[in-house]
Each structure stands twice: as C-alpha cells, then as structure tokens.
Amino acid sequence: MSAAVVGVRPVNVAELQHVRGSFCMAEQPSNQDSSSLAVLDLRAHLAIVRKYWWFTVLVVVCAVAVAFLLTQRQERIYSTSAQVLLRSSENSFLFPFPATGPLALNREGEIETLYVTSPAFTEAALLKSPPEVKVAAAGTGSTLTFNARGAVPEDLAAAANVWAQTYVTARYAETLAQNVESIEFLQALIAEIAEDRDAIRVEVDFYDDLLAETTDPDEYSRYLSQMVSIETLLQPQLAPLEAQISEYQRQITEFESVARFLDSPDVSAQVSQLAEVPTIPVSPNVTRNLVVAAAFGMALGIALTYLREVINDKIEGARSVEQATGLAILGTIPGYQLNSDQVVEVIERPKSLAAERYEAVLTAIEFASIGEPVSSVLFTSAVPGDGKTTTAVNVAALASKYMNVLLVDGDMRRPRVHRMLGVSNSVGLSDVLAGEATRRDARQVFERDGIRFDVITSGSKVQDPALLLRGDRWTSLADELFLYDLVIIDAPPVLAVTDAVLIGRAVNGQILLTRLGATKRSDLAEAAKLLATNGSRSLGVVVNRDQESPDKYSYYGQYAEQTAETADA
C-alpha cells in the first residue's frame, strides 16, 4: 500500500503522553507470572485493597457484630480483693505496739502464700466461705491479696473477706501458741541449766560440811585445800550458767509481759482493705473483644480480598492486561456498552472522553508505523463482546479525516459494521471471496458530517468462512486493498474461530481488544499467543471499560476544546 498521508493530523498532548507511555512499557521485557500477586508493587497492593474496600469494611462490621453478640451471651464474671498487711520492721508502727520478741515475724509474702494454700488453712476457710479464693503476695511482699472471681458479686466479697479474716485469726492463734511454746521452752532450758548449777554447788557444799564437822587441824587444812582447788576449778563453769539462767529468766519475763497485750488478733497481721461488692464485670471485656474482632475482621477481609483477586481470572486493570499478553496498552476506552449498536462516537460526540481516547489509539498506530509502515490493521478480541467492532469503526472514522481509509467487516459470522454505519450488507467480503462479486461491487462509501471512507461489509451468509479465508482469493484481495492508505479489518474473536488468525496473515498490524471485568486473563493470554502464530506484528491492546470517568489525560482534551472554541470566537 502507499504510505502517503492525505492530510496532516494534529496530535494532542493527551494522545502523545498516553502512547509514549504505552510504548515505553512495551520495550521492557515481561517475564512475570500473571497468576501471582508476588510481583505486584506497593501501588498495586493498595489498588487491590482500595478496589474492594467495601468488602473489607463489610467483613469488619460482621466480625464486630458477631463478637458483640457472643460477648453479650457470655456469663458475666466479677472480681474483688481483700488485702492483709503483714507485720514487718518497716510497717510495725501500724500495729498495736512495737514488735519485740516473737512478734517481729518479718515473714515473706511468698512464704505466707504457701501457708494460706496449705490444706489445713484451706479447709478452715472453706468451712466459712464455699467459693475458692486465690492468694498472692503484692508489693514488697508485706501484703497479701485475697482475690475472688465468680458470677455472684455478693458471694465474692464475702468470700474474700472471710479468707482474709481467717488468715488474720489463724496467724493470731499461731502467735499465741508460739508465745506459750517459747515460754515453756525457756523454762525447760532454765531447769536443765539449774541442774548443772546445783550439781556444782553440791560439790562445794560437801566440803563446807566436812570443814564444819572436823576438829583435826591437819584434816581441816587438807579439806580446805581440796575445797579451794574445787572452787577454783568449778567457779568458771558456774558463772556462765548463772548468766544463762538470768538471760532466760529475762526472756520469760518479756514473753509474759507480751502475753498481756495479746488481746487483739491484729498483732502480727491485719486486714488493710476489705473486699467490696463489685459492680463492673472483669469478663468478658467488651472493648477488648470488639477491638480484637475489628482487627481480625480487617485482616480476614484483606486476606479474602487477595484470595478473590487470585481466584478471579477476569481482567481488572492495565497491569493484568500487560501480564497476560506482554503487549502495550494502546488506549483505554470508557463508557463501553455491551450488546448495543452504538452510535459512532467520534461523529455523534466528537468532544467526548471516548472520542478523545480513540484518537489515542490512532496515534498509537501512527507511532507503530515509524520505521516499519503499518498499512493494514486487524481488530479482534479473545471472546465476543469486547468492543472490537465499535473500536474499529471509530478509529476508521477518525483516520478518514487524514487518510484514504477502507473499513472491512471480516466477521462473516456475526457482522455488526453495517448496522453501526447504516449501510447495506447484501454484497460484501464473503461474496468477493466466493467469486460472486468483485471488490468494486462490494465497496460502499460511508459519508456523514464530513467523515468519508470506503466500507466492505461481511456480505452474504456462508457455511464456513474459514474455508474462504484459507484460499488464495483472500491473499489476492488483501494485495488489492493495499491501495488504501490504511485498511482496518474487524475480525471475529480469536478463541471462537480461526478466522482472525487466517485474516491476520495478510496484514502488517494486529490489535487485540479486551473489556475490563469481563474478559478472562487466561483467554486474553491464549488469544495473544494465537495471534503471534500467524507471523503478523501485534501492535498492542485496547481496553474497553464500562465506567465513563475522566482520567489524568482528559484534561488536555478539554483544554484543546476550550482553545478551539476561543479561536472560533
């Protein structure tokens, strides 16, 4: 075909930036696995979370609601504590009188917990209060805490107080018993020492009696000498015994004086804090449960979002298109409607966002022609309903402003070009390939609002279009079509039949159409592979999406429109 261009088409900034970005991405090698999210960058992860934010919020709300209902059904558990202060050297001023003798217990709290948990004490306490109470040392060990947990607040307070008072009473009884035992022990020691002392005194008294009875001067002198020797020998033993007896008698006097003050149980331990009836349950913790449920719900929601993204085989964004095909995105067309004979957007609404993006697709074709001319372009898709016909018609209408364009409806199974353009389909491509008509017979001219280009529709229905395309007639016809500056062919979906692959053998550019949220990634990837088998060059992918919302490049189109209106004024 002749590469001459009928007119010079102005390229707006939106097209230039979009297409330049597409081809830059196409130059980068793509060896990523389309079924794995491991290669996604941070923005892709955030996009997934943002896309399904409502689902995550729904999971969080459900998790919190379930946690709240379960929490409301749980039994309310209350807790209360009584405290006992143990007498020590640091806090003895809090007790009835200074700690002396056996009252200076200075027991460690840990040792006291062993005492409280002993079978004897537990049995005594449980006789007064059935609920079990746990005891633990608090602070520096000089305080015991008796904690009771249960469902009846009044019983808990009574149980904790009973245990605390039982401990104080038990310790008081133990103090009394220890005082009596200490006195009896000291008295026994004094008796033993007194026996030793009396034995020494008996020996000395024996010689005193001999001296008193003897009249013989020699015997008197001999007895006196023996008595002096014995006294010299025994006197050092007698003095310590007398001292021990005095000390033990002093201690007995002290114990006896202390016994007069043992009229209160608070001499060695006292209840410093009574347990009160609790009013607020400690379990279940509603706030904690709801916070944990919200965190769990958020984690579960995000995890399910990623699982849904992995399981979902539909094309959801530009990245999935590139990963599936390894091709650049030539344009994204908004506002696509399935199963509707749409108007030709670039004619009916030339200033719309969709028309602007068709301009970007045409610009991409022109960029692809640099260094390697593209004179014929095949538009196809993986499956029906991806917008190939709509895109082919609009791009042909745009290109006809600057080039000699021919639009061919190569979809001889489900043709739509004639309906969109409002032309006859009585004679077309199938008739030419069957030898029943010539190219001139099938050629029609479409003209509206300054747009003019030639059209060859699909023609008469045939049993096997692929059989016609396999023959030499299609190759010969394609050579004749190269007389046009640009030939645009609307071909059937690749996966449905082999027609598109057969048509593609005679073109030098192929464009694959897909629709966000509809086409499967696996289908798109397979279609790209099949197109690559016919030897023709794949230019890229055009993406149709249902939503019509402006993107960052639409500003330039609006700016161009405003500039043109100002110039006209």
Image: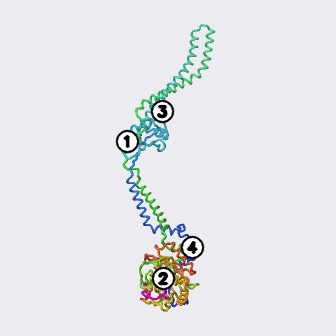
Q: Position of residue 436 (x, y in %)?
A: 49, 90
- Density class for disc 3 (Cα within 10 Å; few <14, some 14-19, many ≥20) is some
Task: Name the residue that disc number 4 marks.
Answer: 30
| Whether label 2 touches label 1, CB < 8 Å | no
In three-dimensional space, the C-alpha distance between marks 1 and 4, rounded to whole angstroms, equals 75 Å
Q: Looking at the picture, does residue 121 appear above or below residue 513? A: above
Task: Name the residue that disc number 1 marks.
Answer: 158
Q: Position of residue 149 (x, y in %)?
A: 41, 46
Task: Name the residue that disc number 2 marks.
Answer: 463
> Does the stretch in magenta take in 425?
yes
The residue closer to the viewer here, 382 or 399, is 382
Residue farthest front in this picture: 463
* First of labels 2, 3 by sequence position: 3
The amino acid at mark 2 is Gln
Q: Write the start and end of the magenta stretch as one range.
A: 419-432
Q: Quadrant of residue 80?
A: top left
Say which element carries label 1. Answer: helix
| Whether label 4 touches label 3, CB < 8 Å | no
